[in-house]
Amino acid sequence: MSDEAFFIDQYRIADEPYYHAAGNEIALFDAAYASRMPVMLKGPTGCGKTRFIEHMAWRLDRPLITVACHEDMTAADLAGRWLLDPEGTVWRDGPLTMAVRHGAICYLDEIVEARQDTTVVIHPLTDDRRVLPLEKLGELVRAHPDFQLVISYNPGYQSVVKDLKESTKQRFAALDFGYPDATVETEIVVREARIGEQLARLLVSIAERSRHLKGHGLDEGASTRMLINAGRLMKQGVNIEQACETTLVVPLTDDSDIRKALRDTVAASIP
Amino acid sequence: MNPDKAASAGQIDSLDEFRTRRRLADLFRGYEDLESGYRESHAVLAGRSAGSDINAWQETVLAMLEANLGSSTLRAFLAVSERWPPGRTISELVLLGHTARNIGRHAGSACARAIFANLPVSLWRLPQAADLAAVLSAIERVVEAAPESVQLVTTRLGSLLTQVDAAGFDAWVSAGLRSCGYDIQKRRAYFGLDDPLSLRLLNPGTDNFVQLERRLIVGLKALWDWQPPLRAMPALPGAPAPRRVSLAGNLLRFPGSFTGATEEAAELLYRAAAAHAGAHFRYSILRFPVGKLKALQVALVSLIEDARIEALAIREMPGLARLWLPLHAAQPFGGTAAPTLMARLARALLDPAYVDEDAWVAKGRALFALAQDCLDDPAISREIGGILGNDLGQMRVQFNARSYVVEPAYRDDNIALWDFGDHPDILTEEIDIVVDSVRIERRDQPEGGHPENQPHSGGIGRARYIEAEGLEGIPVASYPEWDHALGLERPDWTTVLERDAPAWHEAGEAFAADRDIMRRVESMTRRVSIGRRIREKGQRDGDMLDLDACVAAAVARRSGKTPEDGVFQRVTPGSHDLDVLLLLDLSESTADLDGNGRSVLAVEREAAAILAQTMNSAHDMLAVHGFSSAGRDKVYYQRIKDFAEPFDAVTNARLAGLRSSHSTRLGAALRHACCYLASRRAFRRVLLVLTDGEPSDIDVPDPDYLREDARRAVLSARKAGIDVFAFALGDSSFRVLDRIVGERRILRVPRIETLPMRIMQLLAALKK
């Protein structure tokens, strides 16, 4: 047990993660955590969802266990599995079970990517029961009073086959994350990339134009994170065109026409 | 004498190599010039590469000798070998040699020589080894399937490869073989470049605009958040080529090409033109009434307005200056005709570094500079343009309104800025343009938009269609029909006439599915793997222990052996096998327009493209067939795409060539389609019917008869293990379709936009 307690401590966040509030999301999350309400963070990629939950975990002084969800993930990857060792079989808790036992916040990132027969595992934790049945172990784990489940969900990548069931969605309180407005976004880029305000504002204007293409050639426009990356490259002496090429144009699309159009956009924006 | 003794001195040869050299020595006996040519090439190659490559090359030479292709062919190969570029590998040379030899054996040594003559110069177009292999394999396919056309291809190889790259060449060959089938005449026409489809595939975008169109569309959306319909204004024979972009009629129309511009210059012109149009969209917020303005004043007000919007645009996006400035070529001298002065003024207003001493230009500059604080106000264009126009008039400067064209070339004709009202003094030119745009506007509205609804102006188009109609098809099968009143099946009652759907070749009217929809489909199907689950045991990783493997591992460990480490089992998505046959109703009623002005046939084409894309992403097989009927003896059945065929330009051409005619004898078509599906071996076989409603035919008065027969056909399909679904287009209740396929197997599609979602839902459900 103490091994595991030590293990959990590794997930505590020591230094404050910088987060610039866009609205009153911090107060709302505080309120939700007070009753251990499950929370869903909705928004496009690179908008600060993960940074936000890290900030809140630090603020609330809870360990944060993050699981990146993907299509091949199974319920055992979340809950745990039997392993074979020289003495015979041994049960190993999965990250969700660890969080449930030790009162951490479990953050399931991009939960839509996982299959529905995997995500159903979380249901008993999201209602008043707050239990995690482990049939293979024959144990019903009751959640630690400090445990909370948080998921992130990108509504943009919707597909008929990959979507959260209504019954799952409705168990969560949801906070909306979008691109911050230009002033806030500029501030974030200045702070995270350590570049001057004028350059940051230029990058933000380029991102805004790329976001016009959402649904018209791109799934998403440039995210705040991409701008921060561009800024960081520029800080190292890379010129702005090359920085945008590397952090925006090339990652956003493989389509050559759209890449050219994005390059035209970058060229038009810089003095 | 050993030809390559010098090179391999000190090396130990394998037995094969030794034999090869011996054999070569034997064959070369008596042909000293060939032998010396061989030695020279060998020396060059040996200097470049290691032993195994050289041996392969030697074997190629040997093979060529033994194939009896003649000494000139061998000499040609040796020459190519000697001059083989250092950047290319020897194995590519070997591949070239082998392929040429095969081609020579089947199509004659002249063809092989043609390849040696024409392919090496085009190597720069084939940067990867895979490209070279693709081109060679495409030629081999021609040798195999269309031997009479090989020479047509090999002699033109050089010029063909300047027009398309390896992939384009491959696609061109494939399309030719597929669309011409067994018809030798057609094949020769196609590969001899005497066929519109052939030319179209070789010149995917001679029109500069067509190549850039997508980039421009995306660029306009990004920079200005604007999505105007883009059109190319083609150069029509007999009429002057359109020279400037036009924004009239809420369309953005580009000249098909800018005369005299190189490809690179054209790209800049189009981009600059699009950006200029975008600036108008954002900043030209009102139209100027022509009132009593003279043509010269109109031109000048337009010029100032152009300068105004560009200045505003540059304030927001400074990079645009770099796009526009280089295209201003005016110089501060050269005559006093109005167009020259105006071009100089235009440059002066944009380029602060441009020096021009002319008083009028300087005045214009000064007035514009004074207005910098109120650039947002379009009225300044009217004011400044009016003043400057007056000045020019008083200076008696020559201005020919008829021949005036806005300079520089990237700027639009500015017609869209003006409100002509009922002004009687309108210049005739401008009237023509306005009327033209109205005419074009009407033509672009949905009713007029489709080839089947437009009267064909080209006699060629009409002739081709009739020709296709004349070929009704070959009788391939007869089927029974169910008479519900009598309660019995009449054997051999209907005859199915089958043929390949004719391809529609008219340039510019090829069918291509709506891009936005296709992009949505693509994003929906990406990364989706829907299929059966397969349990894999004995894995190194998995979510469950495989007990059998565990026990075996434990036993192994206790007996001191090394246990296998695959003790897990996992469940993975299985193979995807779904065979879908999409059956399109091609009867007369599909020409009817739905609420959005789209014909049912157009929706059916779109559905085929969407289904192909959806299934393409999910690795399943799709066939697309169509049917109509004229009585029980003539059930017309057309094959648009077979299961094994790719969905490509030829399929699109066939879809474009579909026409609505005759009636709907659904039952017979269903039975014939089921024959195709019955022979397939997939996990699930699905027949998807797209029809707009009632089965009916000219020789059947009883409305229920064919309905019941169709239902019967569906039931027997089900018994054979084939699932039948129907699409219900539009909002009608479709009780008829309910009766035929069953209510739970109807997919309601109220709007084409919902079609992708419906199809995905169906496929997901089928794969469970």
Image (cartoon, rainbow, N blue to C red):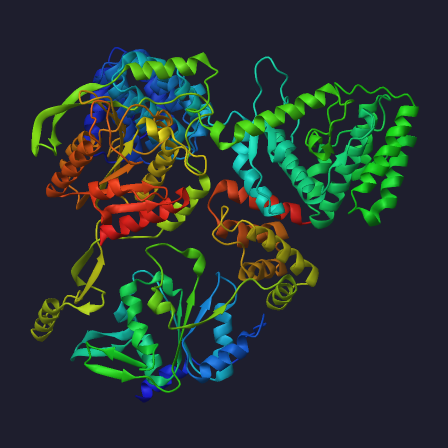
Q: Nearer the viewer, residue B522 or B687?
A: B687
| Picture residue at 35% right of the left edge, 24% below the top | B659
* A49 to the left or right of B276: left
* B284 to the left or right of B664: right
Q: Quadrant of residue B711?
A: top left
| Picture residue at 20% right of the left edge, 63% below the top | B570
Task: Using the rendered image of the protein, determine whether residue A237 is visible from the camera's viewpoint.
Answer: no
Q: Quadrant of residue B662?
A: top left
Question: What percent of the width, then of the height, locates residue B731?
Answer: 36, 44
Classify B618 as above or below B357: below
Q: Exactly how many numbered labels are in the figure?
A: 0
Question: What percent of the width, then of the height, locates residue B593?
Answer: 41, 33
* B74 to the left or right of B320: left
**Quarter of the image that includes the N terminus of chain A:** bottom left
Question: What percent of the width, then of the height, locates residue B287?
Answer: 73, 37
| Picture residue at 24% right of the left edge, 79% below the top | A133
Task: Using the rendered image of the protein, determine whether residue B523 is visible from the camera's viewpoint.
Answer: yes
Q: Nearer the viewer, residue B168 or A88?
A: B168
- Residue found at the far bottom of this picture: A2
Question: What percent of the width, then of the height, locates residue B600?
Answer: 37, 34
Classify B470 as above or below A85: above
| Picture residue at 49% right of the left edge, 46% below the top | A217
Q: Nearer the viewer, residue B171 or B58?
A: B171
